[in-house]
Every structure is written in C-alpha cells, then in structure tokens.
Amino acid sequence: MIRKYHVVAISLRIVVNNFGDHNPNGRIYVLKENESKIKDLVSKNPFKPVELVQPLAIRANEGDVVDILFENQLPFSAGMHFQEADYNVLTSDGADAGFYPDTTVKPGEKILYRLNASQEGIYFFTDLGNVSSTEQGSSVQGLFGALLVQKRGSTWTDPITGGPINSGVYADIHHPFLPSFREYAWFFNDEMEVKDLTGNRPLNPMTNQEAESFHGVNLRYEPMTNRKRLIEEGVVCPDCDSEEVHHDSWVFGDPATPILRGYVGDPAIIRLIHGGVRETHVFHYHVHQWLGDSKNIEAEILDAKAISPQSHYSIQPLYGLGSLHGAKGDVIIHCHLYPHFGAGMWGINRVFDTLQDGSQCYPNGVKIEALQPLPDRPLPPKPTPEKPGFPNFIPGKVGFKAPRPPLGIVGGREMTVLEENAAIPNARPGAVFADPCLDNPVVVEFDISVIEMPVVYNRQGWHDPKARFYVFDEDFDDILSGKKEPEPLVFHVPAGTCIRINYTNRVPHILDGDAFQLVTRTYENGFHIHFVKFDVLVCDGGNVGWNYDSSVLPGQTIRYEWFADTELKAFFFHDHLFANSHQQHGIFGAGVIQPRFSRCLDSRTGEEVDHGTQVTVEHPLIPDYRDQTLFVHDFALLFDKNGCPIQPPDYPGSEDDPGVFGVNYKCEPLKFRLGKDRDPAYSFSSYVHGDPVTPILRAYEGDPIRIRLLQGAHEESHSFNIHGLKWKEERPDLSSSMKAQQHIGISESFTFEMEIPSSGDYLWAFEDEEDIWLGTWGLIRAYEEKVDDLITLPDRNDPPGRTEKLPKQTGKPPELADPQGSLPPNAYPDAPVKKFDVIAFQTSIKYNSYGDHDPYGIIFALEEDVDDILSGKKNPVPLILRANVGDLVEVTLTSKLKKELFPFPDGIHPYPPVKEQAFYPPSLRISLHTSLLDYDVKTSSGDTIGFNPDQTVGPGETITYRWFVDGQFGTCSMWDMADLRNHRSFGTFGAFIAEPRFTTYHDPYSLEEVKTGENVVLRNPLLPTTREFVLIMHDGVRLEDKNGKVIIDPIDGVIPETEVLEEVDTYDYGSRGFNYRSERLINRYKEHSVMHELFSSEVFGDPSTPVFEAYPGEPVVIRLTNPAERRRAHTFHLHGHSWKFDTKDLDSRTQSFIGHIVAGHSDDLPLIGGAGGVFNFPGDYLYRSGNIRWDIELGMWGIFRVHHELQENLPRLSD
Amino acid sequence: MALDFSQVTDVNEIHDQAIIQHFKNGINHKALVLSPSYPYIFIGIIKKVLGDTVEIDVETTHFAQLENRKWYIHIHNIEVFYIERPGAPKIPKLDDL
C-alpha cells in the first residue's frame, strides 16, 4: 500500500527538562498535522518540555511504498535522507551529491520523496543539506527521526488511549497472528546547544565551571548537576550528596527523560537510534538481555551495546519486560559512559505489576497515566489497598532518599505488611519480590568487600594512591600486606548456579580531593551486576526511580542473590551509586559463567580455584582451555613516582579526559621502552626490555583459550586486537565471520574462543595510537616445551620436556627472524606460492586538488610502482594485496627509509598529539603486519614482540614474510608495527584481501590482470564477476596546505569558520579520509559558500576520494578497513544500498551502515541487489562517515557512481 | 528398460531402521545424545523405543531444571549420539559443584 506523510522541518525552542534548560535554536521534523499545535504549545510553555517536541517517529509496514512530502521551513536548504530504504537516488536521496539532481529543498519549498520499505526495521532519517558540526548545523540541533517499519499486516495504537496514532516514540504494535508488543523509540543525541533558564551555558555546581555538554535521549536530558542544586538549596534530601540519588524518584520525582512503561512479561522492542553527531555511546539496559542480531537466533547475547552516530539497532529483550524471572520495578537504561550518564543520558523502563487505568498516583501524588494492556496478554490484577502494586507498596518518604530493601542488609529490617503482600512466597535476602533462582539450583556464596589502598601500575612507579577495588574477604589480609597483587576481581561459576554475595563496604566515607577530583562524600556503594537474573527492586546495587536503594553504608554488609541462568560469558559488576566518582579508581570486576560442570584450576599449581583473572578450565565433555579476563580502563587517575599527577585535567572535577590508561590495573607505556639504541622497533621486545607488567596469558602450543574482554572504566572507545589469532564474531554461530579486532565501550563483554596454533609470543593490544602509547598491551605466550609453573591442560598430552632454556632479557635486540625456515601452521607443502616485492619509502602524498598534502608520507608500494610514484606519475594509494584461499603468500619487504626525510629531528612528534608526549625518535626500521591470515608469529607477524625474533627491517634490509590464506576472510588490515607513533599516521598501512580460490583480479577499464589496486574486477569460474572496491578509512593524518602550513584539524576544517570549537580530545586531532585522499569541505566552502551544494560535482567536479563506478545491478563488494589510528570511532554509511551484518551468515540482519570503526577494523560489504540497490537505480550515491562532528567536514566521503548509460572507458561486467 | 522403483532397495529406510534398531539394542544402557532442538544435550538411560522415538530417563541436560524426567526424542533428529556399553569408554560423570 502507499502510505503518506507530510513532514515539516521547523526551528523552535526545545526545552529539555523541568529545570528549564533549553536549546533556543532547536530544529526538528514534525508532522504537518501537528505543526501549529506544537508551535502554539512551545510559545505558551517557554520553560517546560512539550511532549510533542520529540524526534519524529513514523511507521509503515514492510512492503509499503511510503510517500513523504517534505516541506522545509528552516532558514537553509534541507532534506530527509533515509537509511535502509530503497529509493530512486535521483529523486529521493535528500542530498545534492555528485552530478545528479539536488533533492534537498530551499526554505519554504517542498519535495516528494518516495521510499520502498522492503524490510522491517529502523529507517533512520536526517538532513544532509547542512552538515556543519557547529550549532549552525541541522543534525546537531535535533533534526533527525525514524521511519519504523513493522512486519507486514501490523497496526499500531496509542499505549495510553488505545486509539490510532500517526506518529510518536511510543506505540503498541499489533499483528493478526504475532504477539503484540510495546515499541519504544530511543534516540540518543549529543553535543546539542543547551542553555539554562538564564540563557547561559549551564554551570556545574561542584566545579563552578561550565557543565558537560548535552547528552540526552529523545531531546531530553536529566543532568545530575540540576538535581544536586535542589539538595544544596535544601529543597530535598538534606543528608544526600549528589550522584547517589541522581536517579532517585523518591527525592526528585520522575526525570524528564523517557520512561518506557509496560507490564511484567510484555513483549517489547526498543528501537535504539543514534541521532547525534560525535560520540560512540554504550546503551545499557538493566536486568534484560537480547540477541545481538535480532534476526539471528544464534547471535551473541548482549546487555550493553556500543552505538556510533547515525547507526541503529533493534533491542528485543528476551522473555519480555522483567526478563525470565518477571521482575517488576524501575529498570534504568542509560549510556554507560559515566560522564554522559552524569550529564543526563538516561531513562527508565517502568515495569508495572498492576493495572494502570489512570486512577492511581505515584507516591508524590503525580498521576500515573493509563496504560492499555496488550490485547493478547493476561490482564494485570487491579490494585487494591492491600496490594497496591509497584511502586505503592514501598515504604518510602517523598523528598528523601529511597528506603533500603527489607531483609538484605545484615542487621536490617523485616518486611512491612504491604511488602509481605507484594513479596514472593519464599522471600529471602536479595530475592524479595521476584525469584531469580529457578527451581532450587546449586548455590555458591561469596564474601566480597570493596577496599581502598594504593596500587602501583608499572615499574616506573605510576600509581593510584587511592585505588578502590573489590576483593574476596579471604584475600583481604594478603592484599593489604602486599602478599597478593591487586587485580580486578574475577570469579568463576558454572552456568545454572544461584550466586549469593555478602557484600561489605569497607571504603572510607570520603574520596579525597587532588589534582583530578574534588572531595566527594562517597559514603555508600552497591554492587550492580550485568547479565545475571536478579530482583531489580532490592538487588540492583543501585538507587533507581521508585525502587529501593540497594547499597550499603561503610561497615555494613548487604546480601544479594543472582542466577547465572546459562553460559552468558563474563558479567560485569561495579558500583552504581558513586560510579562516576570512583569507578576509574578500579571498582570493577567480572563473574565468568563457565559451562556447567566446569572446574577452574590455578594454572601454576593445578589447585582448584574460584577466582582469578587467569585460570585453567577443566570440563568432562568439551575441550579444556585457558581463560584470561582483560579489563581496559581509561580515566586512570595516576601519579608518577614523585607524586605528580599524570595528565591532570585543567581543573579538579573536570571530566575532560583526565588521566591515562590501564589494563587490569597495569600499564606499560612505550616511552619507557626505548632502550640504549633508542629504536622504537624494539619497544615490544622482551629481549631488550624484559616482559611487560601487563597480563601474559600462558599456554602450551595447541591449547584452546578464551579471552574475556571487558572495559572497566570510564568514557572512551578502545580497539582490541590480537596478532596472529582470530575468532568467530558471533561465538554461538557456526556461520559467523572471523575477526581479529573488536571495538569495546564500557560495560560491554566479549568472549573470544581460539586455539593457539604454534608456539611463540602473540601480541594483544588496544591498538589505537594513544592507548598503546600509554601501555595497553601485553602478550599471549605459548610454549613448545614443558615449563615448571604451568600445568598441562588435563585433557591434553604433556608437551615435550624442556631441552632449551627459556629466553631471558639480554638488553640487546633479537636476531632477525627466518621466515623461510618454516611454513605457516595451517599451510601445506605444495601450496601455490604468490610473491610480492614491497618497498617501504617516503614520498609526498597529495590528498586533494586544493593542495592539501602530506610531505612526509611513508608508504608501502610494489617495487614496480616505486619509480612512477617517486617521479610523480602516480599519486600513491595504500598498498592493497590480494591472494586466494590456499595460496602461500611471500611478501618480500625492503626498507628504503631515510632519516633525513622524517619531519621531527628532536624526536618528539607534536601533531597529531597524544597524551604524555615524550622523546621517541622515528625508527628507520619497518615491518608489515596483517590481521586474520595464518602465519608463524615467530617469523611473519611483522611484530618484534616478547621473545620472538626481529621481524622488522632497517634501511637496505629485506625480509620475506610467509602468510597462508587459510580462509575466505575478505578484508584483512595491514600496518607497520616497527613504530606506531612515528609511522602509521604518515601512511604505513594497507589492506590484504583474501579472495575465493581460483579468483583472478582485473583492471576495471582494461580488464587486464593486475596485482594491486583499490578498484578491480574479480573473475571466478564459479562465482559472479564482481566489482571490488577497497576503502581504507583512516584518521590522525598530518597534512599541510598548499602553502606548507600545517593543517590543525578538526579546528581548521570546521564550517562555517566563525564558531569557537567545542572541546577537542587528543584523539580527535588529525585530518582524515579514504585511501590517502580527503575532500575537506572547508576547501569547497571557501570557493562556494553554499552548504547544501558542498557534495555537488556539478559545482566542484568530483571529489578526490575514490569515485567508484558500476552499472545497475552489477555485483559489487566493498572491502572496508581502518588500519589507522585514533580512538574516535567512526560510522560508515553508503546511501541507497545495504548488506548483511555478517557476510558469512544469511540469517543476519541487513543494514546500510557499519558502526564503531576503530583501528584494526575490517569488514566486507557485498551489496544486496548489486549496484543501485535492490531496484538497480542509477545515480550518484554518497559513501561517507556518519559522524557529523567532524568526519564529514574533514573529508571522509566520496561517491559511488552507478551509470545509466554505457561509458566509453568502462566495460560492463557482462561484456 | 525402465527402472521399476518399487523393486529398488530404499537405502534411507534401511539406514533409518538400523539406527532405530541400534537404539533398541541400547535399551537399559546409558546414552549421550546431542540434538539441534532445545535443550540440546541429553544423558541418561534408554528406557524404550516407540516407533522412531526414544524414551530416555534423563539425568543430565543443559539445564538442571529439566533433568530427572523422561524425555522423548525423535531419533532422526539426533545429530550425535553415543551409547555406553560394557568395556567401552564411559560417559563422563557430570556433577554440579
């Protein structure tokens, strides 16, 4: 059917909370039918949020044709660009891209967009008429929404009235034969302009400095600072501090942010959408879990999900609201990045257990709106005076902190009569109103405390004088006396266990002040857990909404109960009361739910253990394995050995990226590993510097291992890589792709399951430049022969006895590796050999036609191309190598680096900056590392790490690496490992493409066979002839303009140029683009200052970034990787096309974006329907980043051109 | 000459019957069965075979809550099985903590 909407883009004041904070220059999409009503309400309510002022959510069914009549009432040209939809790019793209018609519209004009809603899901829309990252832009000020496409035959109603609705973030969705469900649209957005009641930027009452920028949900935010003021003014809760009651409705009433309402057991879908511009957030939903891919029942189970700008996911909680155990109460949903959480990026999922017909009130007298029961669900019981239902049985006092739970606190209170009436029959400490432990399972009980004591992070004396962390009570004395080294608490339980915790708060009432923080009264804390089942009212370890405050005061003990219902991997735990104040001091840990019937052993002694970050796991049925848990940690507030703060903020209490980084309370900064020869090529070598203090997972060759990856604190994205190993992206799914890199945000949890194919040292690293510079790396060490202090896995044979002494630190660089001495572990002797001669050298790289260039480029190129590059005949592109499954690849690398061609003779690389700048002169050695392929790490990983031989080459030297293509991995990322600080951002990266067997690669124009290139045609006797486009997305680039002046991006690239920039983090610095090209919009804007025409080839000609060409319907695969180098995560989006989230898995969802791309990322995008999408529409399609701030301005975009007519120079694939 | 399909030996039928017979021979023995259907793993004593369904007195499965009861499993839906017989390796004993 054809479904029609008339949408208007308007400017208006957006009031974002009940404190009158507002955006005076908001821009939103509204339905025409609501336009005058909204404008009227906004003018009459200048200081109150208006319900209708929310991101526009409209709906259609799959199979519908949706006609959007768009009317622009903004003062600049604007449009609507829809992700996921199939549409004619010439009429309905909502952009002015390339050579085709402009589908944005001028102020006062209208345009009709026609969309085909082919698939159920979220069709995010936003504007591309004004991509300025400043407050003069559109997206940043609120101009976004979503078309939510339902299963065919669906209808939707208002959850309050039950009547029909045309738009709204909340709807009940019904279907003739599928269950009805609650649909909640949840739009994160960030960096929006916000002013307080006085019209000034809001202030933080703790620091008296400007508050954190806007971080909100559905154009609302509820910052802690506003609520703290009410405490300071004596309006509420005189004995409270701030953070511990930030989410407490007993004190403040409900927040202005979304409250997603439902009844216990209701099916629900949260449409999680990032409408913001910059940050990668982590969506965390207490109590509930969901399948990471809602289309794939074999997907990994999640309860936290990183989400980058302009990306989206459907969150369908398993078992419905309240999860398996039917928990009632307030369930907080928030961005887990604490500064964002504190700034107000949170809301509540309110799960009622009694019918709400509009006649009830909350304890503070505010009316509870009616909530229609879903028609196919049992009717909830009506509230009675004896059983009033949540929250009215809780004995709280309005204006004061929530009451403590009954039964839980040792020496605490019993239940009131109303509580008894609401309780489960066998109410007990930690399980009063819902029973998480089903059917009398096995019980384990742990005594855990949180303590404060100094912790030293490295040999150089970096330390946290007031580290706070969890310990088992049995270890308490050993840790305090120094017998046992502190590490994040990790305990292990088999699946199906009921876990009881006696938790004691032993930290001081006060977190003392210093250069990083102001004195904070952290007088209570709780133990919040992820993944496991628990009674959210009494056991959340938090203080949320109308729930109890399930924390304890110093010296008190509280009892919690959780159920580990299946093998849910590692579950994160932390304090939820003063998390933003002290989690970065170390208050985090994990429980690992091992397979049922597992036994954990001390890897050194073989004794049975129940906790430790590294254990050996024995199981009667499945192979035994080594288990290592790694926590990455930012905002580590450390002091050096002299007591000076390391990277303090501008003022105490600032959340502007204070401190440094750690892994398991350790770090091994590269600046301390220069050695006598001052060559960064040996920074990772244990021969020169000894082993790092960071974790080393020890195993024998052939052992299965599991890495549990978590992030303990606090705000930033990190990129985890393992060199020489790979794992299934979706662990439960045999069809899953293989990966060797994973983005992680705080609270996410990943398990990587692998086997170590051969002996040697394998590098694990959080491998963006600043992370690894500051020491977030370590080793996996596999021994070939027996060592005394490592047990053999119980189900494997003993390794051979030791014949050679274990290597030791010598202070000297290791011998050169001999890759020709062995084959990669999976290679076979007669495998076809494919050889490449690669030269590493320095050359200027021209990034665009405006003269932006990198005069100090360092690149890899095939030997036959070097002369053409050096003579200027060829402007270089990153090296792209290809081989087929079954090929043995021999890459001979020669270094021609020259000392005099490096830019910084003083040995300090000033820009783009990193924290803790230090003398670290460039290495003249270089190497080539690739992800995913099979090789012997002792000879061919390109890493001179641990006790492996040297795999780098100096000027004039060569090495021939041997890589075996043991799978059809598609894109593998390549980069130099000799000097990550001084080489990578200058261009020492590329891509390796592992193609199907029997594939040949051809120039798209001449069809001659080629050895390299970003644009090729793949021919294969069994597979369709396919165009392959390789996009290497990279950042952290140092460019100079045509006059030789260094370009300081993002500052120099922002349009219009008038704004004072928001805070720029170290990892935001640097230029960026694709394939050594960057079409920075500022250059175009200076020529022709019309925002909506900046992508137009008619005005500017084609961009310098690759313009890929094809004919409609031709098979196309895009190979995407990000080998370099910063921590800011990017989104990639291609207009008008989609692909499978997991290319190996037909069951996975389709999508038109890739989220959270950081260093090491690789992906393959076979376009569904081929060029032009499912309908094969010709035209110019933008490919681009989704980060309005600051990627698009800085040139991260290009064009995919689908020609309607035959081009003279471009043969069709069918020819 | 046209092939008379009614005279052709149905190999699949023989195969299916042989597996059913194998389970019948395993009655009163302990078996380990892996199936793609929930709850995926069953360990227990084979009690009977009814048509192409085996009745197992399940002492262990993936979830403790579903143990110590009889499970009826479609034999041809079983992907992997092992029936423990005298002298052959024993199915490991699986104990919770």
Image (cartoon, rainbow, N blue to C red):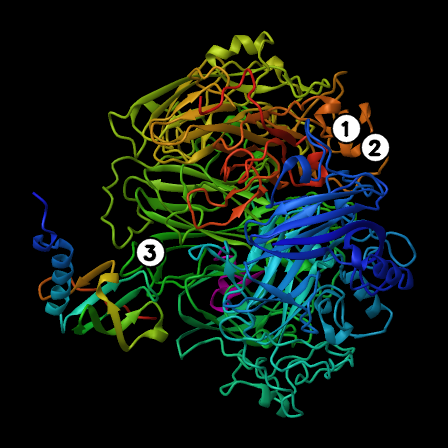
- On the question of residue A811 being in view, the answer is no
Q: Residue furthest front?
A: B1
- Quick one: label 2 or label 1, which is nearer the N terminus? 2
Disc sitting over residue A1082 in the figure: 1
Q: Nearer the viewer, residue A82 or A629?
A: A82
Find the magenta span and give its range.
A467-485
Q: Residues within 10 Å of mark 3 (few under 14, many from 20)?
A: few
User: What residue lies at 68% left-to-right and 20% top-to-bottom?
Assistant: A848
The verdict on residue A1124 being magenta is no
Residue behind mark 3: A605
Name above or below for residue A1077 compared with residue A306: above
Q: Which residue is mark 2?
A: A1057
A178 vs A1163: above or below:
below
Q: CA distance from mark 2 to mark 3?
A: 64 Å
* Discs 3, 1: same chain: yes
| Location of residue A199 by image quarter | bottom right
Q: Are marks 2 and 3 on the same chain?
A: yes
- Residue A443 in which image quadrant: bottom left
What is the C-alpha distance between the residues marked 2 and 1? 8 Å
- Amino acid type at circle 3 is Thr
Q: Nearer the viewer, residue A350 or A933?
A: A350
Task: Say which label, 3 or 1, has the lower sequence index.
Answer: 3
Q: Are marks 2 and 1 in contact (CB under 8 Å)?
A: yes
At a point 69% along the width and 23% down the height, the residue shown is: A1039
> For residue A816, what is the image quadrant?
top left
- Is A475 one of the magenta-colored residues? yes
